[in-house]
Amino acid sequence: MSEILELTAAGALEKIGAGELSGDEVFDAWAQAASGDDLGAYLWRAEPGDRPAPGLAGGDGGDGPRELGGLPIAVKDIFCTEGIETTAGSRILEGYRPPYTSTAVRRLAEAGARVLGKTNMDEFAMGSSNENSGYGEVRNPWDRERVPGGSSGGSAAAVAGGLAPWAIGTDTGGSIRQPAALCGIVGMKPTYGAVSRYGMIAFASSLDQCGPLTRDVTDAALLLRVLEGRDPCDSTSTGIEGGVELPTREDLSGLRFGVPRELAEEGIEPGVRAVFERTVALVEELGGEVTETALPHAPHGISAYYVIAPAEASANLARYDGVRFGPRAEAGDLTAMYERTRAAGFGPEVKRRIMLGTYALSSGYYDAYYGQAQRVRTKIADDFRAAFESFDFVITPTSPTVAFELGERTDDPLAMYLSDYCTVPMPLAGIPAISIPAGLAAPEGGAEGGVELPVGFQIAGPAYSETRILDAAHALERAIGFDARPAR
Amino acid sequence: MIDRDQVLHVARLARLELSEDEVERMSGELSGILDHVDKIAELDLSDTEPTDHVVALENVLRPDEPRPSLPRERALESAPDPDDGAFRVPSPQA
Amino acid sequence: MAEAASARWEPVIGLEIHVQLRTRTKMFCGCALSFGDEPNVHTCPVCLGHPGTLPTANEQAIHYALQIAAALGCEVAPRSIFHRKNYFYPDLPKGYQISQYDIPLASGGRLGDVRVHRVHLEEDAAKLTHVGESGRIHGSGASLVDFNRGGTPLVEIVTEPDLRDAAAAREWAQLLRTTLRRLGVSDVNMEEGSLRVDANVSVRPAGEEELGTKAELKNMNSFRFLERGINAEIARQVELLEGGGKVEQETLHFDPRSGALTPLRSKEYAHDYRYFPEPDLVPLAPTAEMISAATESLPELPEARRERYRDELGLPEAAAIQLANDAAAGDYFERVLAHAEGVEAKVAANWLTNELTAAVREAEDGSEPEPEVFARLVVMVATGKVSHAVGKQILGTIVAEGGDPEELAAGFESDTDIGEIVDRAIAAEPEAAEKVRAGEMRAIGPLVGAVMKETRGAADGGEVTRLIREKLGA
Ligand SMILES: [Mg+2]
Ligand SMILES: [Zn+2]
């Protein structure tokens, strides 16, 4: 059984295809492993022997082996799963069983995957540490006193901690890539529109994208291939033209990489910088051409993001009003019912962002905040477009720091927001980016000989360049040979 | 700088009841965040169009064909106060 | 006194109309539209605002909206977007209404004498019914929400403040309803709420340019109430201003039972809808094909039809309005004209609006004949084959029992050539004929009498007189 847990998803599929393993065996082995969750990674888990995944269309046999052959998958609790409690990490959705299933999960189920569990997350995906969950924090398997990153912290910790073979999450300002980096796994945010958002509980609608969190780049490609596609239920979805191919590339010759000085120098802690520089050297060794470039407006990404995302969220979260679903705080008059229901159901970070977003949209402030932020967004997209005229990819560290300690940034919202410094510009421009583990580094100011933590390396490309990004990441992954694992 | 009155006004717009403590804290935290955000106010972007959509799509329309609705029990399944096939709420006129 | 006061003030009225479109499904989900069904049987995760759901725009609703824009002569925006209008209310499941804001679908049109400011698309709210004391919480009332109506496609039409009195507002609203009905895009039923007309009313000193403060009148669910509500509001404002008071900008609710206007408690303690572009929907950029599909399918609209009937066909104004405003009657008239060759349009219109209407009214459960049949009868009368009076009798029979006009006319054989009978009468009474020819009209009696005798009284006296005079050149 432990042998099963060593396999990547692609590896397990190969053995299932060869008749050496069955999908049920693989599912049960992982369900067993998940039952030992001591990281707070899961909010709901399937039991060994559960089959098919309850309530999910397409979860059962079908004819012959399917693409994902009965493999289990961990699903961020932001995806609606019919009949399975879905909370988005919020008390305001406690006990909520959606009457329908999200397109992403439905596509996985139709390809033969089975839901292993629903993973913990920052409430409504608002956070970079997973300390904002209404159901307890998630711990980083590399150091349990540290955060796994967020908001897809449960998905990242489950994959890194050997509690799931792979997972899906969502990325709005870095919520897949940053936890993937902090947990030492692969995480990819596809082009906006590549994967349907239908059934994915909205945080910031113009930024949210679903993507894979996996042990390696091949698994990420395998998942994305199933997830992407135009969905009539999501008017903004496009799929990826030409689909996604499994990566095969082993070198980087002929590829041009731009390093934007705005995202790779200032504010990056020394350990992270060292790993990044080492990786850049590897890129060159593999034949890639690396040059410094500029994304002049990228440093304003955080400001624009923390106007746009809260503004959209303030509207997206208005539906949690105690009328049609979710708990209600009783009160004689309607306004009091609304105000108390929402006060009791939302956590502090969610309240902060609702306030921020409401303020930014309110009369007299709209243009200075929302309007200006959307202009900055145009500028950031223009910067990337210009860069991609000279480069195939833009590379940066994924996170300015390695995993930080629990509680370290909870009292300083701005410091927490700056965790997304390197990941925010891409969703603002709607472009895809991957984070792969590039090595280990000691945290800044950490004790000599203390624990070393994973560092992520980010590769971003133009819209719909997923196959090329995955190919480059695959070549680099081989060269890096990251094989460290957290102690169990 | 966001003062107490503004916090209360915004909280009312957002239908959030805040404790005295929260009002105090919110005023400080929002001011701090907005100080940072205000840096973009200094950029001269008068010639730049604001982004309204990152995908270049237009006219994504659905054919006018009915799809099954939820059975009423399902529609009301999660309601905190279902009543006689409807969702009961405190009256807005109360 | 009141007369004098009202002469000193000029009312200024603009209308805001919400039209429920007659699509099969809702604006942003596939739930079927309905009216009068059990509550909450036409809902889905999307129109209940469940977490994770997304709107998808109804193609037919856009087509209808483009037809309305074309009918009102509006210019369609090359690219318009949807916005979110944010406020909390139990009939609004998402906490925002998807509507249009700074760039509406179309703007700058005209219908009749009134300019149309804008035409935009949005979604309707659910139905909220107040049910009184809940019993559970002391002193509180409760309401029940039914989401069947929630999400119905709405077109909002806003006029410029071009109307100057309540009767004109009513008349214009009726013209709009007829136009929309003719388009077939809505049931336009005010009682059922598929047509909702709000009025912005202000008054200003006569001769003044600047607009006064306006009040918004809602809930006038019939044309009569619309007129009454506006009149009441004008009177209220004039009285207020005459007494040295000031008009507050507010929303007033019309109570059809008492006819009173009461201020609505505002939905938000401060109105701040925080509009921003709806990120879940992509822009609407009507293509040339979409626009031509809307314009090419336009029927002849009441205003154009009225003008054509009056100016080209020479119908009296009243008949032109009647036939133009009643799409079914107008279409019937068109078919009659097509089959009544050689008959003057105004004669056919007169037969339709007077004789046929009367015959249908008189018959217990009569029905109007096929237009072709009716046309044949009109031709028979017009060519003098039968007299007007006989024609009316034949029509009565056809409406009550059906039948063929020629066959029925056989029963009045002796009248079939009333012209010959008149000729015979003139020949039989040469003296009288000579006097009439000389202009002595009193002498016509014996001639008419002779015709009546021969037709055993079935001839129409007026018609006979007319024919005699015609033949004698008098
Ligand atoms: Mg409206
Ligand atoms: Zn629906």
Image (spheres, rainbow, N blue to C red):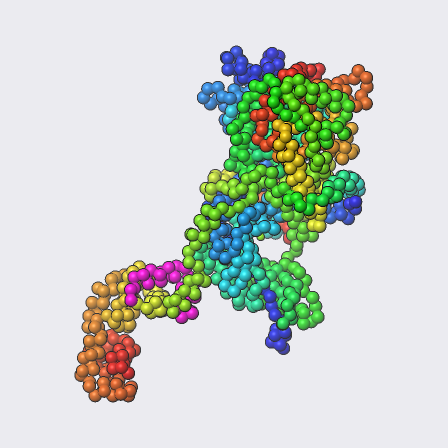
Question: What residue range appears in magenta?
Answer: C315-342
Determine which quarter of the picture holds residue A325. Answer: top right
Q: In the rendered image, which quarter contains the N terminus of chain A? A: top right
Instruction: Depth check: give the residue in front, A83 or C17.
Output: C17
The location of residue C426, given as percent across then percent down, is 20, 82
The location of residue C448, given as percent across then percent down, is 24, 81
* Left or right of residue A18: residue C209: right
Residue C446, compared with residue A251, is above or below; it is: below
Q: Residue at x 25, y 82 (%)?
A: C472
Instruction: Depth check: give the residue in front, C11 or C306.
Output: C306
Instruction: Depth check: give the residue in front, A329 or B16.
Output: B16
Instruction: Depth check: give the residue in front, C267 or B46.
Output: B46
The location of residue A300, given as percent across then percent down, is 72, 37
Q: In the rendered image, which quarter contains the C terminus of chain A? A: top right
Q: Main secondary structure of the magenta part?
A: helix
Q: Residue at x 60, y 31 (%)?
A: A462
* Residue C338 belongs to the span the image colors magenta: yes
Q: Residue at x 18, y 79 (%)?
A: C424
Q: How many marks?
A: 0
The location of residue B7, given as percent across then percent down, is 75, 45
Residue A62, compared with residue C83, is above or below; it is: above
Residue C100, compared with residue A253, is above or below; it is: below
Residue C360 appears anywhere in the view? yes
* Residue C52 belongs to the span the image colors magenta: no
Determine which quarter of the picture holds residue A353. Answer: top right
Q: Residue at x 81, y 17 (%)?
A: A448
Determine which quarter of the picture holds residue A282. Answer: top right
* Left or right of residue A449: residue C358: left
Residue C79, compared with residue A432, is above or below; it is: below
